[in-house]
Amino acid sequence: MKLEILGTGCPKCKKLMQLVTEAVQETGVSVEIAKVEKIDDIVRYGVMMTPALAFDGKVAVAGRIPSKDEIKKWIGGDKPKSGGCNCGSKCCS
């Protein structure tokens, strides 16, 4: 599994990286964690608001920091319900 933190390095992006790292350590699952910081690369994911988190190339959440419990559930195999942002238009699904 590959997790990607999409963001330019703002405090919220750093917090998301911290939560992802902690969640991975607590679950003990073998995961590759990568940062995507270039705006052009972030936009290619269809993300317009950061921070964002992608699992194996698919955006799970954008524009907010998910809780550590949410991240742990997703790592465990539960699919994110929104498929991305919470705007309701399914733009990130």
Image (cartoon, rainbow, N blue to C red):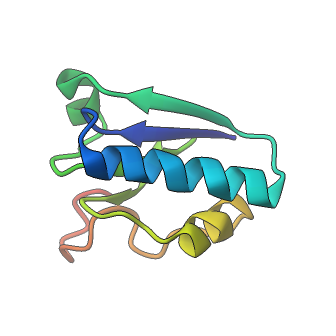
Horizontal and vertical percent for residue 73? 66, 71
The residue shown at (53%, 56%) is 19
Q: Is residue 77 left or right of residue 79?
A: right
Q: Is residue 72 left or right of residue 92?
A: right
Q: Locate residue 42: give its quadrant.
A: top left
* Whether residue 51 can be seen here: no
Total marks in image: 0
Tell which of 28 and 86 is nearer to you.
Answer: 28
Tell which of 45 and 73 is nearer to you.
Answer: 73
**28 vs 65: above or below:** above
Horizontal and vertical percent for residue 48? 15, 47
Horizontal and vertical percent for residue 18? 51, 49
**35 vs 54: above or below:** above
Tell which of 58 and 6 is nearer to you.
Answer: 6
In which quadrant will I find the N terminus?
top right
**66 vs 57: above or below:** below
Q: Is residue 86 left or right of residue 27?
A: left
The residue shown at (84%, 52%) is 28
Horizontal and vertical percent for residue 6? 35, 39
Tell which of 21 and 38 is nearer to you.
Answer: 21
In which quadrant will I find the C terminus?
bottom left
The residue shown at (61%, 47%) is 21
The residue shown at (43%, 41%) is 5
* Whether residue 26 can be seen here: yes
**20 vs 79: above or below:** above
